Image: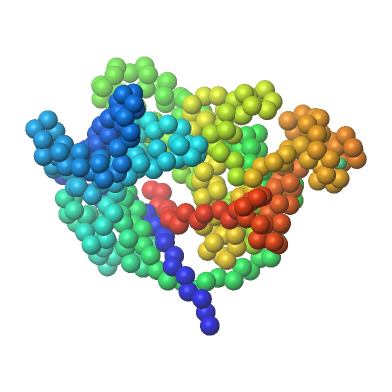
């Protein structure tokens, strides 16, 4: 008998909207941003007054008032469901903050990740034969097709990136439960100087190694700053800067996809430290372990790139391994940088510099990140061997959605 499992997958296409549809999408994304910011400032005010945070249902009731009130009548033009989804996003942002997975929710800015999500499949019509999708209040939108999206539509997200509109369609379908082809296990240590180091001594270069793009980005940013604000030339320069941002983002995503595909194809079990990204970035800046030598994670830009990179890396690994029947195991980091993998001696002095590990008891030497990766792998083996999931590690949750059909035009 073959086991069948449900697979959620997202397919992203570039839209070819009419001028009117573009204006509507901008307006609707603006309404979503307004609702998000309005709800966030309300929650902040409640907190300042010592009141409890409003739940999702309470926020939705408020949204209805805003839509029907006299101050923001234009909210009524925007589709309801995407507006409610932004309230869900705010809920999630708070949850992630309280779970120490993310920073405190921030206000959304115009032109930064403008998007709207349609969660109800009953309101979405996908006509793949004619390469068009129907979305409430936008009508039929044409898109560039690279490959068909198999399965039943679950939701759709419209977003603006680099001056172009995209739609990401998530579908669900049944696939055979795969039997892992690979049998080996590997440990991964993620860091700043090296994006990821493996227990077999190989490593991935840091994510901020897209230097040539970044040199160009800075040049165009300088050019933009010399223009008169909101002039036509300024707008042109700004569009150029946004295009480069999008290109850098695509290059990074592409890099991460290649890396996670290779890892999940070659290993049945991957162990990774269950680190909170926030802590990692803080230690990168030099406030936790060692002073942050060799680290250029100080600027906001680099920080956010690292944040996203690690989240994304782990997310991709989790679902790609699951697709192939393997598993990702998140291991509680305990002495991973101080314990000698050869003799088990634990001492801070074992780690002599950021990069160098030398055991003071037995003399074992290796790159410190490789030692970290080996030490992450060991408890992972224990988790699998004795089902000991509470103490030393746990199966990482699979976050299902992904864009496999990236279209970069
Ligand atoms: Zn030793």
Determine whether 15 is above or below 183 in the image: above
Where on the image, by quarter, is ligand 1?
Answer: top right
| Quadrant of the image occupied by residue 371 | top right
Q: Residue drawn 67% across and 22% down?
A: 291
Instruction: Looking at the picture, tell me which residue is in the foreground, 377 or 10.
Output: 377
Of all residues, the one furthest to the left in this rendering is 70
Question: Looking at the picture, how far across and down is residue 370, in whole percent?
Answer: 74, 43
Question: Looking at the picture, how far across and down is residue 170, in whole percent?
Answer: 36, 58
Determine whether 177 is above or below 76 in the image: below
| Quadrant of the image occupied by residue 98 | top left
Instruction: Looking at the picture, tell me which residue is in the foreground, 193 or 239.
Output: 193
Instruction: Looking at the picture, tell me which residue is in the foreground, 35 or 300.
Output: 35
Of all residues, the one furthest to the bottom in this rendering is 1
Question: Looking at the picture, how far across and down is residue 171, in whole percent?
Answer: 36, 62
Left or right: 211, with 153 as reference point:
right
Of all residues, the one furthest to the right in this rendering is 362
Residue 331 appearing in the image:
yes
Q: Residue drawn 51% across and 76% down?
A: 3
Left or right: 306, with 405 as reference point:
right
Q: Residue drawn 59% across and 34% down?
A: 280
Residue 196 appearing in the image:
no
Q: How is the image coloured?
A: rainbow
Question: Looking at the picture, how far across and down is residue 391, in whole percent?
Answer: 65, 50
Q: Residue drawn 77% across and 29% down?
A: 353
Instruction: Looking at the picture, tell me which residue is in the foreground, 379 or 377.
Output: 379
All told, the count of numbered labels is 0
Left or right: 338, with 137 as reference point:
right
């Amino acid at each position: 008998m073959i086991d069948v499992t449900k697979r959620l997958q997202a397919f992203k296409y570039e839209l070819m909207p009419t001028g009117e549809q573009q204006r509507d999408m901008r307006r609707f994304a603006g309404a979503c941003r307004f609702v998000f910011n309005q709800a966030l400032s309300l929650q902040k005010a409640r907190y300042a007054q010592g009141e409890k945070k409003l739940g999702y249902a309470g926020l939705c009731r408020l949204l209805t008032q805003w839509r029907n009130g006299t101050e923001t009548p234009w909210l009524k033009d925007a589709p309801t469901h995407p507006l409610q989804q932004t309230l869900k996003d705010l809920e999630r942002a708070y949850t992630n903050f309280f779970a120490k997975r993310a920073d405190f929710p921030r206000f959304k800015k115009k032109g930064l990740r403008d998007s709207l999500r349609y969660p109800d499949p009953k309101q979405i019509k996908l006509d793949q034969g004619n390469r068009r999708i129907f979305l409430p209040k936008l009508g039929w939108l044409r898109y560039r097709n690279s490959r068909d999206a198999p399965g039943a539509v679950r939701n759709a997200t419209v977003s603006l990136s680099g001056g172009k509109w995209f739609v990401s369609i998530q579908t669900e379908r049944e696939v055979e439960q795969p039997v892992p082809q690979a049998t080996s296990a590997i440990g991964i240590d993620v860091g700043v100087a090296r994006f990821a180091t493996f227990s077999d001594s190989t490593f991935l270069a840091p994510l901020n190694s897209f230097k040539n793009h970044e040199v160009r980005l800075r040049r165009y940013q300088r050019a933009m700053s010399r223009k008169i604000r909101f002039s036509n030339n300024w707008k042109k320069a700004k569009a150029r800067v946004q295009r480069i941002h999008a290109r850098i983002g695509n290059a990074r995503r592409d890099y991460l996809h290649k890396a996670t595909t290779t890892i999940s194809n070659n290993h049945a079990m991957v162990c990774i430290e269950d680190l909170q990204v926030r802590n990692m970035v803080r230690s990168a800046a030099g406030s936790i372990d060692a002073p942050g030598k060799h680290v250029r994670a100080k600027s906001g830009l680099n920080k956010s790139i690292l944040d996203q990179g690690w989240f994304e890396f782990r997310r991709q690994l989790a679902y790609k391994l699951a697709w192939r029947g393997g598993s990702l195991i998140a291991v509680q980091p305990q002495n991973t940088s101080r314990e000698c993998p050869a003799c088990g001696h634990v001492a801070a002095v074992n780690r002599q510099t950021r990069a160098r590990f030398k055991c003071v008891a037995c003399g074992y030497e290796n790159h410190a990140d490789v030692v970290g990766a080996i030490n992450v792998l060991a408890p992972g083996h224990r988790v699998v061997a004795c089902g000991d999931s509470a103490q030393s590690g746990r199966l990482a949750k699979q976050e299902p959605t992904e864009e496999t059909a990236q279209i970069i035009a």
